[in-house]
Image (cartoon, coloured by chain):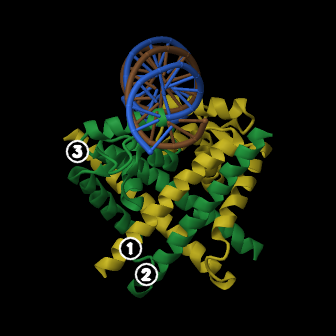
Chain colours: A green, B yellow, C blue, D brown
Amino acid sequence: MAEIDQTAIRSLRSLILAGERYRQTVAEQTGLGITETQAISSLITYGDRGQHELAVDLGLSSGASTALVDRLERQGIAERYPHPTDRRRTLVRLTEQGLDVVRRSGDWLAAALRDVVPPSEMGRLAETLTTIAEQLNQESSRLAAKEDVSREA
Amino acid sequence: MAEIDQTAIRSLRSLILAGERYRQTVAEQTGLGITETQAISSLITYGDRGQHELAVDLGLSSGASTALVDRLERQGIAERYPHPTDRRRTLVRLTEQGLDVVRRSGDWLAAALRDVVPPSEMGRLAETLTTIAEQLNQESSRLAAKEDVSREA
DNA sequence: TATTGTTATACTCTATAACTATA
DNA sequence: TATAGTTATAGAGTATAACAATA
């Protein structure tokens, strides 16, 4: 059992590394920075959001988030638009050009998923990957919260 | 079919994002930088290597690789040792302290894998994750090579 | 000649902190 | 008072290029 767990941990570690290498490749292929392509991924995955929420999601400070969205706008990848009721907030959405990056990079991800399981099992695999992502996010949140507590102590 | 593919692509994208957030959390929890923890992951996953191979793996320049290994040595995480036959090369290996980071961060990964599939299917899941990682790496290599060609043209 | 690694310089990106506007 | 976002400054990390040592 423990042996299988170690194998599973190793497989997830290698997938995370492969994801980071993919991220660099996407950045090089599109001429964008690492953080820009992460923001694009985050926006398409979780939808339009305010800069603050985007910053928290990517682990950035508010100042870095302002600079990030500045770069995205300058490159025509995303754009700011006002929050309908809260005039403090600025929401961010992908432009057509940003969606094009999503489509191209999505094709490259599809290549990584080709033939790993029979088509009939692809739906179940997707559910499994999503569950792992959710539990990994939960674990990250748990650890980040623990650090905050120790800081206050 | 195409619909399932889009779902699968979305699930992989979210897992890659979760992996990047996990990376940041590990860096914060250990007091190391992002690149340092990537190097640790790479060394434990693919074994000891020369600085050049490590640099290629992480997408770094040779100068950045020197600075990286300098930092790892200063923090007691890894150490240089001479290649047995090629005196140009310097190999890098994790110290006991580096292995401790591997163990701690491995526990956090284990938490993400808990209960996603029955124990009897964990071995098969590990194989699937490893295959996805390999194919994603292949795709990254293919794209990087394509860029090199276009540069020469 | 090609490869591995080091050094020096400039640049990009981010954190911090002080600030404005709105809730 | 608290929150969202901007700006200015300083610092960390990287790419580039020139270099030394070895294959």
Residue A38 is situated, as x and y percent measured from the top left of the image, at 42, 49
Element at badge 3? helix
Q: Is residue A66 above or below residue D19?
A: below
Q: Nearer the viewer, mark 1 or mark 3?
A: 1
**Nearer-the-camera pick, A9 or A71:** A71
Name the image quarter holding residue D21: top right
Residue B86 is situated, as x and y percent measured from the top left of the image, at 60, 36
Chain for numbered disc 2: A
Looking at the image, which residue is at 75% across and 46% down? A149
Sequence order check: which comes first, mark 1 or mark 3? 1
Residue receiving disc 2: A123
Q: Are marks 1 and 3 in contact (CB under 8 Å)?
A: no
Identify residue type, mark 2: Gly
Looking at the image, which residue is at 71% across and 29% down? B74
Residue A42 is situated, as x and y percent measured from the top left of the image, at 42, 54
Q: Is residue B70 above or below residue A109?
A: above
Residue receiving disc 3: B150
Q: Are marks 2 and 1 on the same chain?
A: no
Chain for numbered disc 1: B
Q: Are marks 2 and 1 in contact (CB under 8 Å)?
A: yes
Q: Are marks 3 and 2 on the same chain?
A: no
Label 3 – label 2 distance at C-alpha: 37 Å
